[in-house]
Image: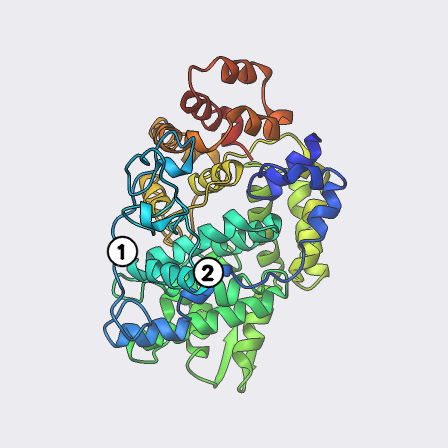
């Protein structure tokens, strides 16, 4: 397999799936370019609430935007470590000799759960839809949004586009109080960041901020200038520093008033004052520099070359913040194809492991990320999650990865062929690992060695 194809799937994507590289290696650059277009709606979005629905249900004292209490499903059964024949595991009991899973009369339960949450006898589509809707409704809004995102990352055929959208979700980190609707972060990601991530940066920022501020007003039950958010907009979302107190006050007041403001030494007035202020802010050279540095650190290296940052900054300014043009420039950088040096964050590691093995994320994946101390959509601050190796390869952090890899291997090894998966990653793997996998006493140990290898930690 082509090393460049695996490089494209690893650095710019979410990790290779078995069989992906055959299509990518024909032209890795074209494979990436074809993904620079608007993303389709997420498959599980139909089970989730809109931003407005979350606010209305929160106001009514509900976590979910539904009219009836959620149906709580029984806990999922652990997946056996060896699943040589799926008929051996029905309601956790061995199938008795001579009984067929195709004959419901011969089983104690015709709808025993499988690892996907559905029955072996493949219920009707409408039944599957109801089962999954009930499962989503059995979760909190927070966990439902997280699981839906993980499902998208696992199944997508546009991993670079989803990784690009992920970057902007990380960039526009949102920290809301515990009293706010807990599905709001996910709804803002789905409705404003993901759909607009290849469009105009200025327009994405304005649409996102107006929705965020509107949500804050709804929760606070009052329209007062969001001074704290103005500081976040300047320091984290645009310029990279907090600016002057006067600029913070002018920006915050513009969200609630249509008067005259002096912002960054420029006067603004009229009903479109806020839009023009945000546009100037978004296309400021300092904003371009801030975004270029974050993109280079995220996709290239923890310490990217100065000329890389300057090139991305120039492209951003010349294109007036056209993010599709910036994405094209990023994948065209020579240094973007240097050897992989970035360390995967825990969520990136989990997603890459699931894509490699083909095992779909279930709600347990959310608990795994809580164990990794990186819950999706709930960053520790408006700065988002750290994106450098220093935070994620401490002894404690690595131990958590190995603990998860051991647990995952013990429960899932019967469903995969570790040596076959090794072939997918072979261009980046050391040869001694293949020998270790061949000599491993069981598939459990082999899968653990593969998922715990240094190469699986890099992107």
Q: Position of residue 106 (x, y in %)?
A: 32, 45
Q: Position of residue 343 (x, y in %)?
A: 50, 34
Q: Is residue 63 left or right of residue 238?
A: left
Q: What numbered label is drawn on residue 408?
A: none
Is residue 392 or residue 313 the one in the foreground? Answer: 392
- The C terminus lies in quadrant: top right
Quarter location, residue 395: top left
Q: Is residue 175 visible?
A: no
Q: Is residue 190 left or right of residue 320?
A: left
Q: Residue at x 58, y 76 (%)?
A: 276
Q: Is residue 380 left or right of residue 324?
A: left
Q: Position of residue 75 (x, y in %)?
A: 26, 48
Q: What residue is disc 2 on?
A: 44
Numbered disc in front, either 2 or 1: 1
Is residue 46 or residue 116 the one in the foreground? Answer: 116
What is the number of callouts on the image? 2
Q: Earlier in the sequence, mark 2 or mark 1?
A: 2
Q: What residue is disc 1 on?
A: 73
Is residue 409 or residue 454 the one in the foreground? Answer: 409
- The N terminus lies in quadrant: top right
């Amino acid at each position: 397999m082509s090393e460049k194809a695996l490089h494209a799937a690893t650095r710019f994507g979410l990790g290779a799936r078995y069989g992906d590289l055959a299509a990518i290696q024909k032209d890795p650059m074209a494979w990436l370019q074809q993904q620079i277009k608007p993303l389709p709606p997420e498959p599980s979005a139909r089970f989730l609430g809109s931003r407005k629905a979350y606010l209305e249900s929160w106001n009514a004292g509900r976590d979910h935007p539904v009219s009836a209490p959620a149906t709580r499903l029984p806990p999922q059964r652990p997946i056996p470590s060896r699943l040589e024949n799926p008929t051996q595991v029905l309601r956790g009991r061995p199938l008795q000799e001579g009984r067929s899973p195709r004959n419901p009369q011969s089983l104690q339960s015709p709808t025993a759960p499988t690892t996907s949450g559905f029955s072996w006898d493949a219920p009707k589509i409408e039944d599957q839809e109801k089962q999954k809707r009930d499962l989503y409704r059995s979760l909190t809004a927070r966990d439902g949004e997280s699981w839906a995102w993980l499902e998208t990352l696992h199944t997508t055929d546009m991993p670079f586009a989803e990784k690009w959208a992920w970057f902007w979700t990380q960039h526009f980190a949102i920290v809301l109080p515990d009293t706010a609707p807990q599905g709001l972060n996910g709804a803002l990601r789905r409705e404003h960041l993901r759909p607009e991530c290849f469009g105009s940066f200025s327009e994405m920022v304005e649409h996102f901020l107006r929705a965020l501020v509107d949500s804050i007003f709804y929760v606070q039950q009052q329209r007062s200038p969001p001074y704290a958010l103005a500081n976040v907009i300047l320091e984290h979302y645009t310029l990279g520093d907090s600016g002057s107190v006067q600029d913070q006050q002018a920006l915050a007041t513009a969200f609630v008033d249509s008067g005259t403001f002096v912002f960054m030494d420029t006067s603004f007035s009229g009903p479109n004052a806020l839009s023009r202020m945000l546009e100037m802010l978004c296309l400021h050279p300092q904003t371009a520099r801030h975004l270029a540095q974050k993109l280079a650190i995220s996709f290239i290296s923890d310490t990217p070359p100065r000329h890389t940052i300057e090139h991305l900054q120039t492209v951003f300014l010349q294109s007036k913040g056209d993010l599709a043009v910036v994405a094209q420039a990023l994948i065209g950088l020579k240094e973007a194809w240097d050897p992989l040096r970035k360390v995967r964050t825990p969520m990136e590691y989990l997603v890459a492991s699931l894509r490699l093995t083909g095992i779909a994320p279930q709600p347990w994946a959310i608990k795994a990320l809580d164990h990794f101390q990186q819950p999706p959509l709930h960053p520790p601050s408006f700065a988002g999650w750290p994106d450098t190796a220093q935070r994620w390869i401490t002894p404690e952090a690595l131990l958590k990865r190995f603990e998860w890899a051991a647990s995952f291997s013990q429960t899932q090894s019967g469903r995969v062929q570790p040596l076959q998966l090794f072939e997918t990653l072979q261009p980046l793997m050391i040869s001694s690992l293949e020998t270790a996998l061949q000599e491993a006493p069981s598939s459990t140990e082999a899968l653990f060695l593969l998922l715990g290898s240094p190469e699986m930690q890099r992107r």
